[in-house]
Image (cartoon, rainbow, N blue to C red):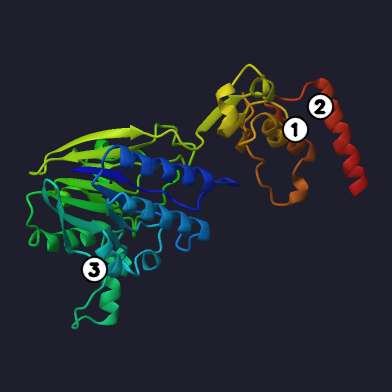
Amino acid sequence: MRIAHTSDWHLGRSFGPVSLHDDQASFCDVFVGIVNDHDVDLVIIAGDIFDRAIAPTESIELFRMTLRRLRDLEVTVAVISGNHDGADRLSPYDDLLDGSGVYVRGGYEGIGRVIPLEFGDGPLDLVLLPFLDPIAAPDDDPDRTMDEKLDRSVQRTHHEVLADTIKQTHSELRAPRSVAVAHAFVIGGDRPEDRPQESDSERVVEVGGHGAVNASVFDGFSYTALGHLHRPQNVGRENIRYCGTPLPYSFSEDHQKSVTIVDMDAAGAVEIDTVELAVGRKVYSMTGTMEELLDSTSHRDAEGRFVRATVTDPGLILDAKSRLEARYPLTVEVHLQPSGVVTTTAVEPQASPDRIDPLETVVAFWSERQGAEPDDLERELLTAAVAAATKEAS
């Protein structure tokens, strides 16, 4: 059988002030084509379908129509909520959808249950593990007081609630192969090098500083499809994998986007491949003086991308963003960082503000902005300006 693994669509998201709806619609169209062209049997969407709990109407409609198109291909679809999604909004009709071949799970309702599926080459056990907030974990022990329950929920970690949930499933696994789908920050081990690569656009899932889940909780599954991190990568071993986002959502996401394709035999052995995506607008970061950045022969690749510009001119630059937008219409961020700037020591606070020398303050400001001390003529002009301002103030 063949699985298409995707996640973190973040429908409804913008890049700076620019809506990504059209880019996301293009991806959904391409994704349905990939599923069809590759004869996929099972589609997995591992959380963060939407960018926020209350998604825009156009994003909800886009997701609904994409699910409909996938079902028209007679493909089984498995969806879980992520930390961005509103779990209660994503999965209120999960029991009704199960009969249609679309399995949606969100929050703690119904977790820990194995979904037995049958494919052309044999059975598969599916375990859906949406983002589980430890604070919201149910505690039905009647002997605990409310204070004890609150204290327990605060102290529990994401690893603990996920491990407890997975433990429930193992006694129910019957098929010779199984797939777990989870949305979490998963690490391969205790060493720094076991930590996966993160991106700037990921919302932290830590609760009380304990957000990491050890990959060992997924031992025993033939394949674990992960969502949350935006860069495609394996965690610890090949069969525990983040597929990454279909589009870049921050300037740190300058890597190739893709969909993960998993071929699994009847015994659960997997072969993993990727289908590269060429949809949406890429990101581009550049550094230089305004003259260099606006040179028509440079940075031609940036003209159709989201741009972050670091401007290194030593003086004050007026209208930097609008000037850059004239050449790079998708300029989202502009940072002024004069080259060779010497950070000056702040003026020592005195007992009274009257004892601060105004000229020293102005000279320090000039030096910081220009990246050099004023020359004789500039100092003379600054001195005259301070004298005139002091006279007028008195």
- The mark nearer the N terminus, 3 or 1, is 3
User: Alpha carbon of mark 3 to alpha carbon of mark 1: how far?
Assistant: 67 Å
Vertical relation: 148 (above or below) 110? below
Q: Name which residue lies at 85% across and 32% down.
A: 383
**Residue 389 image offset from top left, x and y in percent:** 88, 42
The three-letter amino acid code for the residue at tag 1 is Val
Specify whether 120 is left or right of 76.
left
206 or 24: nearer the eye? Answer: 24
Q: Quadrant of the N terminus?
A: top left
Mark 3 is surrounded, within 10 Å at the Cα level, by few (under 14), some (14 to 19) or many (20 or more) other residues, namely few
At numbered mark 2, what does the secondary structure look like: helix, strand or loop? Answer: helix
Vertical relation: 64 (above or below) 321? below
Instruction: Mark yes or no: residue 189 visible.
Output: no
Picture quadrant where residue 134 is located: bottom left
Q: Residue furthest top?
A: 297
Q: Name which residue lies at 60% across and 31% down.
A: 309
Which residue is labeled 2 in the image? 379
Question: CB under 8 Å between callouts 3 and 2?
Answer: no
Q: Name which residue lies at 67% across and 23% down.
A: 294
Vertical relation: 64 (above or below) 310? below
Q: Nearer the viewer, mark 3 or mark 2?
A: 3
**Residue 362 image offset from top left, x and y in percent:** 76, 36
The disc at residue 110 is: 3
The three-letter amino acid code for the residue at tag 2 is Arg
Which residue is labeled 1 in the image? 363
